[in-house]
Amino acid sequence: MSSTISSRLADAGVQLPNAAAPAANYVPWVRFGNLLQTSGQLPLADGKIAVAGKLGANVSLEDGQIAARHCAINILAQAQAALGDLEAIGRLLKLTVFVASEASFTEQHKVANGASDFLVEILGDRGRHARSAVGVPALPLDAAVEIEALFEIA
């Protein structure tokens, strides 16, 4: 495995986008002490929602995992904007994953794996985290997934 976060991103074929600007009256991240909290990140790719709709209706589990991966990429873009260098990440402490779901859909945890697996791949042991995965009736812009993250800064 490559030794730096940027080399692992390159190995995965991922180029971080510019950090998304807030869509309303909030900031994209807050740094307090040695912690960095991101606002919820949507599954944006090329400035557009990559996966829209609801799990258990018009979005498959696999597409939900892809949406979660896009959210994770955007989380790293926010961390890059906040810290200037992803190597400043001490540890990913927690992900909170919101999954737009039909009432009968109960595999939010499997959707969340799309982000968790990617972040462990890219951050290594620093990417092992606590997590919540919650089904919700709707998300902004009809996004299938939204994820926020809490990091410890090295």
Image (tube, grey):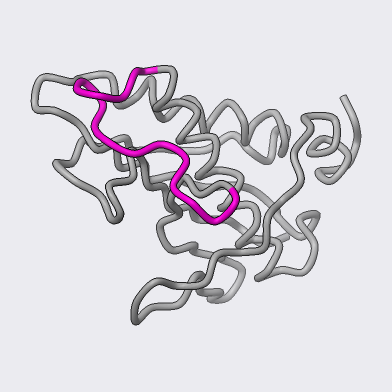
Q: Quadrant of the C terminus?
A: bottom right
* Looking at the image, residue 100 lies above or below residue 28: above
Whether residue 50 appears in magenta in the rendering, the answer is yes
Query: Seen from this angle, which residue lies furthest bottom?
Result: 25
Quadrant in which the N terminus appears: top right
In the image, residue 93 lies at what x, y percent?
52, 47
Measuring 65% from the left and 70% from the top, which residue is drawn there? 82
Q: Is residue 3 left or right of residue 90?
A: right
Q: Main secondary structure of the magenta part?
A: loop
Q: Is residue 32 above or below residue 39?
A: below
Q: Does the magenta-highlighted stretch encompass residue 70?
A: no
Q: Which residues are magenta?
A: 46-61
Image spot of residue 88 (x, y percent): 76, 60
Q: Determine the residue positioned at 19% across, 46% down.
A: 138
Whole-percent x, y for residue 17 in the image:
68, 55
Of residues 30 and 98, the one nearer the viewer is 98
